[in-house]
Amino acid sequence: MKKLVGRKDLALALTLAWMGMIFYLSHQPASQSSELSGSFVDMLFIFMSFMPVSIYEEAVHFFIRKSAHFSAYFILGILVLHTLKLFFTLRYSVILLAFIISLMYAITDEFHQTFIPGRSGELRDVLVDSAGSFTGIMTYLLCLILYNKLGGLDR
């Protein structure tokens, strides 16, 4: 029983830590946030300079920023569902609750950004975040189904 409680504590701590990381990144002023994504764009353009392709820099910058949103909430969806699964029997209501928690966090995160210099809350970002959470939750469920069909790690 002690081991199960420890797993619950760890899962909850990881979920809250990930939420904290999202909050931290959202709390950066626009200049710092742009600098971070700009460094990824610069690395990508160095790589792309070896290819006979021309790319519109602003489109790449947009794609990287939205991919970061999607990926952060993809992971959040997985963590939230896994944590809830440790506390409750996995049912549709628990899956829905995981999505609602992720969605509400995305909404509050965008609202939080309205108070940060140079940042704004965007409905589009909430939609990207929600798509990431939904995809993470569905990926977790698919992996769980495959894991159970294969008989766990015993095979």
Image (cartoon, rainbow, N blue to C red):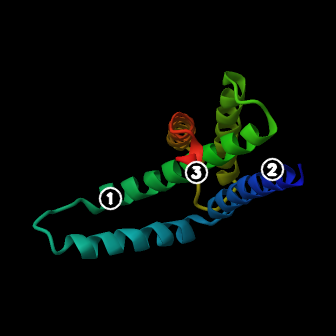
Count of labels shown? 3
Outermost residue on the left side: it is 52
Q: Residue at x 79, y 33 (%)?
A: 88
Q: Which mark is residue 12?
A: none
The residue that disc 2 covers is: 8
Between the residue at mark 3 and the residue at mark 2, the CA separation in whole angstroms equals: 17 Å
SS for tag 3? Answer: helix
Crowd class of label 2 (few under 14; some 14 to 19; many from 20; radius 10 Å): some
Looking at marks 3 and 2 on the same chain, the residue that comes earlier in the sequence is marked by 2
Say which of 30 and 15 sits in front: 15
**Figure check: 13 above or below 29:** above
Q: Is residue 73 visible?
A: no
Nearer the N terminus, badge 1 or badge 2? 2
Q: Confirm whether residue 11 shows in the render.
A: yes
Residue drawn at 34 percent across, 74 percent down: 42
Label 1 sits on residue: 60
- Residue 76, position in %: x, y? 63, 48
